Amino acid sequence: MPTRVLEFKGITSELNNVLAAIENNGGKIKDVSKSETKSGTFYMIVYEAPEHRINGIIEAAKTHVPEQYRRSGLHYGGNAKTLKN
């Protein structure tokens, strides 16, 4: 399975919900990192998932992250899909 990255600004409960959404849609969590900045806390999740599950993961993640915090999205193969879309 290809490795993907999902990044967003949020709080711990949103992180936990996004992690569950990834796993519930066939993804496997590889790593989670947290970055504190003046504008808030950003989480980066590295995971593996089958190609046909990507859209399900993005849609599930959108339901757990408030729209104003959908900073960036799913990156793979030089292409990017963001949670804003």
Image (cartoon, grey):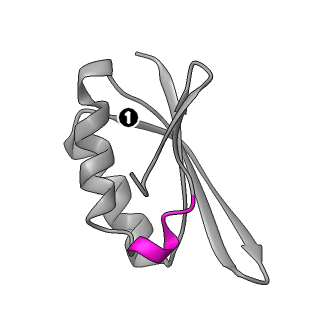
The spot of residue 15 in percent (x, y) is 44, 66
What residue is shown at x 32% (from left), y 32% (from top)?
54
Q: Residue furthest right?
A: 38
* Residue 83 left/right relative to 51: right
- Quadrant of residue 76 within the rendered picture: top right
Residue in the picture at 37% in, 54% down: 19
Give the crowd class for mark 1: few <14, some 14-19, many >=20 residues within 10 Å.
Answer: some
Camera-nearest residue between 66 and 45: 66
Residue 37, above or below 73: below
Residue 14 image offset from top left, x and y in percent: 39, 72
The residue that disc 1 covers is: 28
Q: How many marks?
A: 1
- Our reading of the magenta stretch's main secondary structure is helix
Q: Would residue 43 appear left or right of 21 to someone viewing this image?
A: right
Identify residue type, mark 1: Lys
Going 51% across and 74% down the picture, which residue do you hit? 10
Q: Is residue 37 above or below residue 64?
A: below
Location of residue 26 by image quarter: top left
* Image location of residue 6, percent across then percent down: 51, 46
- Residue 41 lies, with reference to residue 72, above or below; the image says below
Please give the range of residues in magenta: 67-71
Assign a secondary structure to mark 1: strand
- Residue 12 vs 3, above or below: the answer is below
Task: Assign the N terminus to one quadrant of the image.
Answer: top left
Rendered residue at 46%/18% (across/down): 2
Q: Position of residue 80 (x, y in %)?
A: 54, 35
**The stretch drawn in magenta includes residue 73:** no
Q: Is residue 68 magenta?
A: yes
